[in-house]
Amino acid sequence: MTWVLRKLRVDRRIGVVDAFQFPSGVRQRFALQQTKLVGDDLLLVEAATRQWFRLAARHPKAKLSKPSTVVDDLWQELVLHSREYATFCDAAFGRVLHREPESPGATDAPTNRAARLRHTLDLARHDEGCGPRGIPLLFRVDRQLGMDHDLGYVADCGGHGECYEVSGTVCLQHLTGLGRQPPGGPTPAQSPLGCINGQTKVWDPLESPRLNPRSQ
Ligand SMILES: [Zn+2]
């Protein structure tokens, strides 16, 4: 297949993901489980899950990590609606996208997991246009919603030559080692509220049509 045809196919699949509306049964069951979610919180989770699906549609061979528990939970709920999920997968991926638990087995050393998380971060930053210092939605959604079941991510602990461990956070700058600096030199410590188009800000579901096609 030529490059042009491949790009057309990817564009079509990304369009499917962007236009995907989570079935009402999925939304209702998910909302019942996630009692902390209020107001537009569900829209934020859906947008983050679409971002995850875009990565899978755009990079079918990539070994991706699952940075967000709440996204994984919504995905699981969607998988349980097997008929709707099969239809969506066929259109968005051309195959069933299997949801597998992150299982740190013998062949999956911590360095491999870190590299996979780093790769997922790079792809999500590219998806969102974050630049090398931002925290894309997929990585910030749990903390932004005040979920207490998981680690939060910080763009950079501020350490040079060593990574300053902060309880309850994962430093994205030093995921795969200490030697890498983003273009432009050292990065100041940054709040985990994320970035859109390179700026640090709180995501507003009403002002980001790229992440929330429903608002268009
Ligand atoms: Zn660090």
Image (cartoon, grey):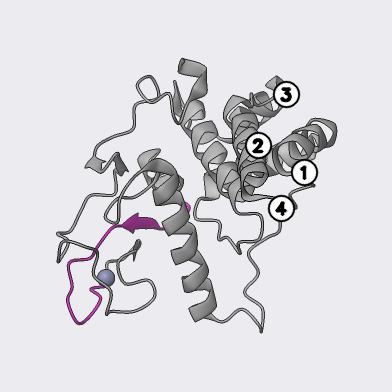
Please, is residue 215 above or below residue 204 in the view?
A: above
Secondary structure beneath dot 2 equals helix
Q: Which residue is mark 1?
A: 94
> Disc 1 on helix, strand or loop?
loop
Residue farthest toward the top in the current orientation of the protein: 216
Q: Magenta span has 111?
A: no
Amino acid carrying mark 4 in the image = Arg
Residue extending furthest toward the right: 83
- Start and end of the magenta stretch? 147-165
Element at badge 4?
Answer: loop
Residue receiving disc 4: 99
> Marks 1 and 3: which is nearer the front?
1
Residue at 66% x, 84% y: name it: 106
Looking at the rendered image, the disc whose residue lies closer to the viewer, 2 or 4, is 2
Location of mark 3 (residue) = 25
Please tell me which residue lies in front, 191 or 184. 184
Separation of marks 2 and 4 at Cα, in angstroms: 18 Å
What whole-number distance in Å separates the C-alpha atoms at marks 2 and 3?
A: 23 Å
Q: Between residues 194 and 125, which one lies in front from this camera angle?
A: 125
Label the magenta part by its dominant secondary structure. loop
Q: CA distance from mark 1 to mark 3?
A: 24 Å
